[in-house]
């Protein structure tokens, strides 16, 4: 028997998942229900189904309680991720939720509690974890190839987005509609990888710029500086208005270094730790003997999107370990929430963050918003191809 | 007639200059006097001279007022750079001073005033400005090839220095002796290039770590975040305990991008600005049409060291424009002073910095220092080769 899936939100990412599932995963999964508050979004996908195969809903609760689905895939605007997930967990459904897990961690914590109570299978779609280059990097770190990580630097300024992108769709680019900018929309992937590779920082200093080079309310540029309990320091630099941007990750440890860029991982590794070398050397400046190895590995995001859904269904049916357990969605959100709060308060923010304070500050911005979107278009703009490049 | 030169400080950099001058520049320059508080430093170079050619001094004032020199090359510990320079300017001499210009900007401002009053030729040895790759980058920026710079990122973590390096020589690695750590010793070169390329920031947030992975009093790791009046943001990341480090510079503008690493400059350039593209595009995420060009250019630091001295002598004699006018030495020092002050006060520091406050904070650290150097050796450790790699 196939896994009966309902998709809630069939616009951008939802329609991508739908195509992927229909084209690649039909042996395992049967889409039995679709939901969108804009009925014409669903109708676009009609050629995939006969009328009696799939039921269309305009209200997510109706889909959740229809008895037609074993699990739901949620690809709505960010604010709705936790509320719809919670409803689905209450109904005993499995949940596959798009990133980010939500807009603020207080709500995502409720979502995690609901998931725990339900005991069903919960995945947040951090698809980058399923891609070959990042699997390899995770393996190298976990195998101790670079020793204890001491520095992480990620320059990811190739999330180029135009004003046209922000004008399309009323919910984007406002505190009330989207709840954040590029840290919440494009960068959750990389922020999740940061915490997957080296854990959660103990404190964060954020430098976010709101509406700097786009006519938006939220941040279009950000640098995040992070300190970790074990001495690791990390810098994360992102931007939507730079072309051609850079996408380069460096993780330096006490036994070597990983650099990833342009589909290539370069690994330097030593047999001894920097501490051991430093304690015994007569030299002023090394060198520490190192081996270098290169791995050319491309990511296929489309394939991996299907892999993420398949993995979730397999986890629900056979107990396969999840690639991106939903409970971990709060981690990357903690970092971006901390970066906002740090910018707003112009100070360090300790983690775990003061969730009430964050929500209060966010609500302040929603309530006092005077931002009026100009030239809002209803057309769907396609930036999905930019998710596939490395 | 040759330019009569006195060298003050004949240990590390001073002895390098001496060798360079004797080997490459003997047609233009005659070394007539040497000065070192450790007489045996000078004696090492005795094979270059006959006794009556060069006079040896133990006190810099005696050399300055000897009537034997037209100019002095100063390569003493940092604190003495401005004080000796000021004395030389008062005597009407030309001054070639090693970097950094000094330890704190208040004193360097006095040095600059003395230089102005003297009207003699004043160069600070920011030798990187004489190297082919950085000349090229400066030309590209000044020619508008990348438009207005918006982001600068420099990861320069390949200033590896061992405990052995810090143990050699009593003046290193303390607030009282050296006045700072890697930002004051190794990084002035790159901090100078930052301000040469994109100017001086309006405010700085420093994250310096003092004695983090070396038994020293000063910083062995630092990240500096900088904001500029025109919206440019810059991140500078350095460290002495990472191996193999990275040395990569990125400057992104509104018409293109420069990346420099491993003796290669990559230039992306567009015919239109990002603002123009953004205002007119129907796309969500570009691309902006770009040309890419690569330049393989190596730096020869040793040759350039000679070039810097020659340029200074030519400037003094024939009015040749200086490569690194001494008055500009205060700029990079402003950035490192600001980074310290920001770390000490755990807050932003506006530029120009509050020079009295900085000095007060520095003196506090000197006065309350309880740091005792262990295993101090007198041997000269040679890290000069690390200045030649890119």
Image (spheres, coloured by chain):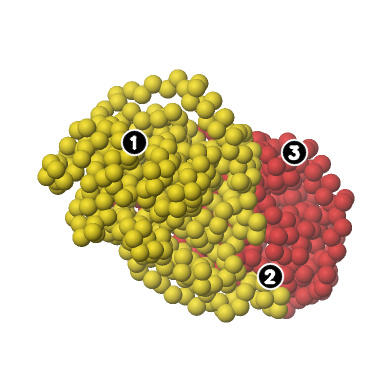
Chain colours: A yellow, B red
Pinpoint residue A204: horizontal percent, then vertical percent.
Answer: 60, 46
B81 on left or right of A353 = right
Indicate the chain on which mark 1 is placed. Answer: A
Indicate the chain on which mark 2 is placed. Answer: B
Identify which residue, A66 or B279, lies in the foreground: A66
Question: What residue did someone put label 1 on?
Answer: A61
B243 on left or right of A74 = right
Of badges 2 and 1, the one in the foreground is 1
Q: Which mark is residue A355?
A: none
Task: Kindly state the secondary structure of the residue where label 1 is placed.
Answer: helix
Q: Is residue A66 above or below residue B129?
A: above
Q: What residue is rendered at 66% in x and 67% in y?
A: B161
Of badges 2 and 3, the one in the foreground is 2
Identify which residue, A15 or A248, lies in the foreground: A15
Pinpoint residue B118: horizontal percent, then vertical percent.
Answer: 73, 42
Q: What residue is rendered at 70% in x and 46% in y?
A: B343
Gap in angstroms between the C-alphas marked 3 and 1: 64 Å
Question: What residue did someone put label 2 on?
Answer: B162
Task: Kindly state the secondary structure of the residue where label 3 is placed.
Answer: helix
């Amino acid at each position: 028997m196939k896994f009966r899936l309902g998709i809630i939100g069939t616009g951008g990412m939802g329609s991508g998942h739908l195509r992927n599932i229909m084209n690649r995963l039909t042996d395992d999964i049967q889409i039995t229900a679709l939901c969108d508050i804009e009925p014409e979004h669903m109708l676009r996908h009609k050629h995939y189904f006969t009328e009696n195969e799939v039921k269309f809903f305009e209200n997510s609760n109706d889909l959740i309680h229809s008895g037609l689905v074993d699990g739901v895939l949620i690809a709505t605007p960010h604010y709705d991720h936790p509320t719809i997930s919670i409803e689905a967990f209450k109904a005993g459904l499995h949940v596959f939720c798009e990133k980010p897990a939500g807009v603020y961690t207080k709500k995502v914590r409720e979502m995690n509690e609901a998931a725990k109570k339900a005991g069903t299978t919960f995945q947040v779609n951090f698809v980058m974890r399923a891609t070959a280059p990042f699997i390899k990097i995770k393996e190298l770190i976990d195998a101790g190839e670079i020793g204890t990580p001491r520095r992480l630097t990620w320059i990811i300024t190739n999330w180029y987005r135009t004003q046209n992108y922000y004008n399309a769709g009323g919910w984007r680019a406002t505190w009330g509609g989207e709840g954040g900018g590029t840290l919440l929309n494009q960068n959750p992937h990389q922020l999740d990888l940061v915490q997957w590779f080296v854990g959660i920082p103990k404190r964060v200093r954020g430098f976010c710029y709101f509406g700097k080079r786009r006519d938006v309310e939220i941040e279009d540029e950000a640098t995040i500086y992070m300190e970790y309990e074990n001495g690791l320091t990390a810098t994360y630099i992102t931007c939507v208005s730079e072309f051609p941007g850079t996408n380069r990750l460096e993780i330096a440890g006490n036994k070597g270094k990983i650099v990833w860029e342009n589909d290539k991982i370069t690994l330097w590794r030593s047999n001894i730790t920097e501490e051991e070398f430093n304690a015994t050397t007569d030299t002023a400046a090394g060198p520490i003997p190192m081996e270098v190895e290169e791995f050319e590995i491309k990511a296929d995001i489309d394939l991996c999107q299907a892999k993420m859904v398949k993995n979730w269904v397999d986890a629900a049916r056979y107990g396969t370990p999840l690639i991106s357990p939903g409970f971990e969605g709060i981690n990357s959100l903690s970092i971006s929430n901390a970066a906002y709060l740090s910018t707003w308060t112009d100070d360090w923010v300790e983690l775990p963050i003061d969730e009430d304070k964050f929500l209060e500050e966010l609500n302040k911005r929603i309530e006092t918003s005077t931002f009026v979107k100009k030239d809002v278009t209803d057309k769907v703009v396609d930036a999905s191809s930019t998710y596939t490049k490395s």
